[in-house]
Amino acid sequence: MRTQRGEGKVGCIVSLLVLGVLVAAGLKAVPVYYGNSELVDACDFIASDASKKPLETIDREIRSKARELGVLEALKDKNAIRVSKSGNGENANCVIVLHYSRTIDFYGVYKWTLVTDKRISKPILENIS
């Protein structure tokens, strides 16, 4: 019976090692994915309320939200955020295009580039009482 004692230690150590690696990777990846998701949601909300705002104000609100979420460094490129209004009357739309990438560095072992390429289009609602 003594030869079987301690046989499960190697499996336990490997399981704990794998769990530790997953937790460490999650600590790096989750904030980046969360920030991107929150920025897209904020742009969706900003676009739906764009009827009474000029394009510069919309752009400033998006950049302010990106700064709050820590995504602003990825938006250094001039074309990372494009805001436009198209159409007139009942067919008017506010279009926000997000195109940027962020690199997640997994402790110098591996680098993953997350590309965000979203187009948000919302109708501009006017004359609603």
Image (tube, rainbow, N blue to C red):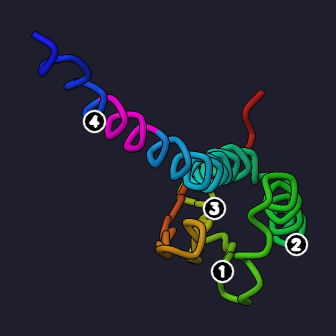
95 or 98, nearer to the observer: 98
Q: Which residue is mark 4?
A: 10
Mark seen at residue 80: 1
Q: Which residue is mark 2?
A: 56
Residues at discs 4 and 2 in contact (Cβ within 8 Å)? no
Q: Which residue is mark 3?
A: 94
Question: Marks 4 and 2, how far apart in space?
Answer: 60 Å
Mark positioned earlier in the residue sequence (4 or 2): 4
Amino acid on which disc 1 is placed: Ala
- Left or right of 36, for residue 117: left
Residue 123 at x, y percent in the picture? 57, 51
Mark positioned earlier in the residue sequence (1 or 3): 1
Question: Marks 3 and 4, how far apart in space?
Answer: 58 Å
Residue 127 at x, y percent in the picture? 75, 40
Residue 73 at x, y percent in the picture? 78, 75
Question: Marks 2 and 1, how far apart in space?
Answer: 15 Å
Amino acid on which disc 2 is placed: Glu
- Left or right of 78, for residue 13: left
Q: Which residues are magenta?
A: 12-19
Quarter of the image where the N terminus is located = top left
Mark positioned earlier in the residue sequence (2 or 3): 2
The structure residue drawn at horizontal position 57% and vertical position 68%, both measured from the top left corner, is 104
User: SS class of the residue under badge 4?
Assistant: helix
Amino acid on which disc 3 is placed: Cys
Quarter of the image where the C terminus is located = top right
Question: Marks 1 and 4, how far apart in space?
Answer: 49 Å
Badge nearest the viewer, 4 or 2:
4
